[in-house]
Image: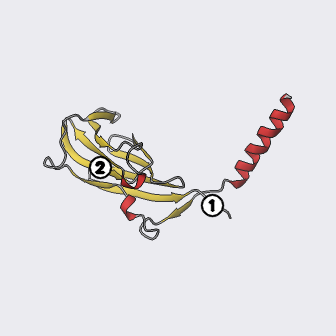
């Protein structure tokens, strides 16, 4: 019985690996998905209240903190209408706001003291990678990848 189970799981694993190919990089605007790109902008006290902010992560040297201001409940809001808003703080002073729009999932990670990586998934088959430089207030890198139906 164990050998049949092993054979079945091996066949499933092999078929998944055979179908899995390298994701294809594509342009969000060419695919009509530019509204799913995150927005990095200067902090605006009129629009971004820090009341009820939830800490998400701290930079490696602990000089910067990312706090979550709001996040859609995906059990009540469709993915294409979802919104998450986070603020980057430098020594408790807000400096930038990040808006993640139209997501199924997202995550933030500090690469180093200056660089913040945003990984987002606006759909089942698409992922986004954005690297934001907090010091210069610029997006250094962004890419979108298509994962489903990739066959070469």
Residue at mark 1 to residue at mark 2: CA–CA distance: 31 Å
Q: Secondary structure at mark 2?
A: strand
| Precedes in sequence: disc 1 or disc 2 | 2
Check disc 2: other Cα within 10 Å, few if <14, some if 14-19, many if 20+. Answer: many
Which one is in front, 132 or 66? 66
Q: Which label sits on residue 149?
A: 1
Label 1 Cα neighbours within 10 Å, binned few <14 / some 14-19 / many ≥20: few
Residue 141 percent location from the top left of the image = 40, 57
- Whether residue 110 is visible to the viewer of this picture, yes or no, is no
* Residue that numbered label 2 is attached to: 98
Residue 21 quadrant: bottom right
Q: Which mark is residue 69?
A: none
Q: Single out the residue that lies furthest toward the front.
A: 76
Q: Residue at x 22, y 34 (%)?
A: 52
Give the x, y percent position of residue 117.
40, 46
Please identify the quarter of the rendering in which residue 148 is found: bottom right
């Amino acid at each position: 019985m164990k050998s049949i189970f092993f054979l079945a799981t091996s066949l499933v694993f092999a078929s998944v690996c055979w179908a899995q190919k390298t994701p294809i990089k594509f342009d969000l605007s060419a695919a009509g998905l530019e509204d799913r790109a995150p927005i990095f902008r200067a902090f605006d006290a009129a629009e971004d209240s820090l009341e009820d902010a939830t800490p998400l992560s701290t930079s490696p040297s602990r000089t910067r903190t990312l706090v979550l201001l709001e996040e859609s409940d995906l059990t009540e809001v469709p993915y294409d209408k979802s919104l998450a808003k986070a603020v980057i703080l430098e020594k408790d002073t807000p400096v930038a706001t990040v808006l993640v729009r139209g997501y199924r999932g997202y995550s933030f990670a500090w690469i180093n003291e200056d660089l913040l990586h945003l990984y987002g998934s606006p759909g089942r088959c698409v992922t986004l990678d954005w690297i934001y430089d907090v010091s210069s207030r610029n997006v250094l890198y962004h890419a979108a990848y298509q994962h489903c139906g990739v066959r070469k």
